[in-house]
């Protein structure tokens, strides 16, 4: 059996309002990723680690998702990206924090995993490690899109308005659609992730993000933190999306694994962890797959871009329904 599950971020409050004009592009991208990578995974051409890396690379290349090109823009007007990856069989892991010039931050994390030590590199050292390892170097101008520039301008205007607080800023990216009404409005935020079960029964998880619009310089979200945004062991692989601080404070991905180990009830375990994250301001979602062949894609926001490939069956969704 082979299973690939992906997400493209969660966001928004309230009932599902239907697709935005940008959503068909995101749907096409998710279908492409699942079809291409799922087929390779099922044939045994690639293992779970390469599958999640490839899937996330393809999502990083889609400017409509918040990772790689099209990442959101931070407080100082620059893009900084985080990514992490974990292999369940031996719990090998790799992570990069605040990289600024890599087309594929997840590949740099994968290279760190293969090197074996250390597990995490940050900033210039992580950029240089990636470039020296063969990850394509790109400019900030290449990473920035008009859509993200527009969202950033709106964030700046909101920040300047009376009553705006730092706390507002921390959720702005996820709730942007509810707050603004211009051509740049968009409810899907777009951190990306993938989890996979390969034909040898092994698991891996990967997550990549530009973080949150207007994030303070030096901020580190949950995405590059093993056990918070990403986790894989011999039983379960997890990738999270949402307001990162709450996922860090609950060690969400690892806690889900622990719950699952003791209950072996995947759906009960995923609901439980999202219920724990939410009161800390961490509305969002996650994807998970287990060695028993179950997978889950729960979210507590208006939407979560998501999809799966299982033995040739491919489905994607944004709101409550899958198509
Ligand atoms: N978790 C990410 C972060 O906090 C954002 C997201 O998932 O959209 O950086």
Image (cartoon, rainbow, N blue to C red):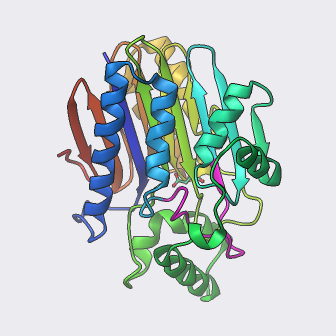
Instruction: Please determine whether, in this image, residue 174 is positioned above or below residue 181.
Output: above
Give the main secondary structure, helix, strand or loop, of the magenta stretch: loop
Name the residue rendered at 32%, 48% in the picture.
Answer: 30
User: Where's the N terminus, which quadrant?
Assistant: top left
Q: Where does residue 95 sit, x and y in percent of width and height?
A: 68, 39
Q: Is residue 272 above or below residue 80?
A: above
Q: What residue appears at the point 41 percent right and 79 percent down from the top-left corner?
A: 184
Residue at (46% x, 75% y) in the render: 147
Asked whether residue 143 is drawn in magenta, I would say: no
Residue 190, percent from left and from top: 45, 56
- Is the residue 12 above or below the residue 104 in the image? below
Q: Quadrant of residue 28?
A: bottom left
**Residue 303, horizontal then vertical, whole percent:** 33, 54
Q: Is residue 57 visible?
A: yes
Residue at left 72%, top 55%?
Answer: 98
Residue 254 visible in this rendered orientation of the protein: no
Highlighted magenta segment, given as a residue range: 66-82
Expressed as whole percent of the image width and height from the top left, the position of residue 12 reads: 39, 62
Apparent side of residue 174 relative to residue 295 in the rendered image (left or right) = right
Would residue 167 appear left or right of 174 to someone viewing this image? right
Instruction: Based on the picture, tell me whether residue 70 belongs to the magenta stretch.
Output: yes
């Amino acid at each position: 059996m082979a299973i690939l599950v992906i997400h493209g971020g969660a966001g928004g409050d309230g009932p599902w309002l239907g697709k935005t004009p940008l959503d068909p592009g995101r749907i096409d991208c998710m279908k492409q990723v699942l079809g291409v990578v799922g087929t390779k995974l099922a044939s045994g051409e690639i293992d779970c680690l390469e599958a999640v890396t490839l899937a996330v690379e393809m999502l990083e290349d889609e400017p409509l998702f918040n990772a790689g090109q099209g990442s959101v823009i931070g407080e100082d007007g620059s893009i900084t990206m985080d990514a992490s990856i974990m292999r369940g069989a031996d719990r090998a892991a790799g992570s990069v924090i605040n990289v600024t010039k890599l087309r594929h931050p997840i590949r740099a994390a994968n290279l760190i995993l293969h090197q074996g030590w250390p597990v995490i590199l940050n900033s210039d050292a992580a950029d240089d490690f990636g470039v020296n390892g063969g990850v394509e170097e790109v400019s900030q101008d290449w990473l920035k899109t008009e859509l993200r520039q527009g969202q950033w301008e709106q964030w700046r205007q909101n920040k300047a308005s009376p009553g705006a607080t730092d706390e507002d800023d921390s959720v702005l990216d996820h709730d942007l659609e509810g707050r603004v009404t211009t051509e740049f409005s968009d409810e899907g935020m777009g951190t990306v992730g993938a989890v996979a079960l390969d034909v040898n029964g092994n698991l891996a998880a990967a997550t990549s993000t530009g973080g949150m619009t207007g994030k303070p310089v030096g901020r580190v979200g949950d995405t590059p933190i093993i056990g918070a945004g990403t986790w894989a062991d011999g039983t379960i692989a997890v990738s999270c999306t949402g307001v990162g601080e709450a996922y860090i404070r609950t060690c969400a991905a690892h806690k889900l694994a622990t719950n699952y180990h003791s209950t072996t009830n995947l759906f009960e375990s995923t609901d439980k962890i999202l219920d724990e994250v939410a009161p800390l301001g961490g509305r969002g979602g996650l994807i998970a797959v287990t060695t028993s062949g179950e997978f889950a894609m729960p979210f507590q926001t208006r939407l979560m871009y998501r999809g799966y490939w299982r033995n040739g069956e491919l489905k994607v969704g944004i709101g409550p329904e899958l198509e």
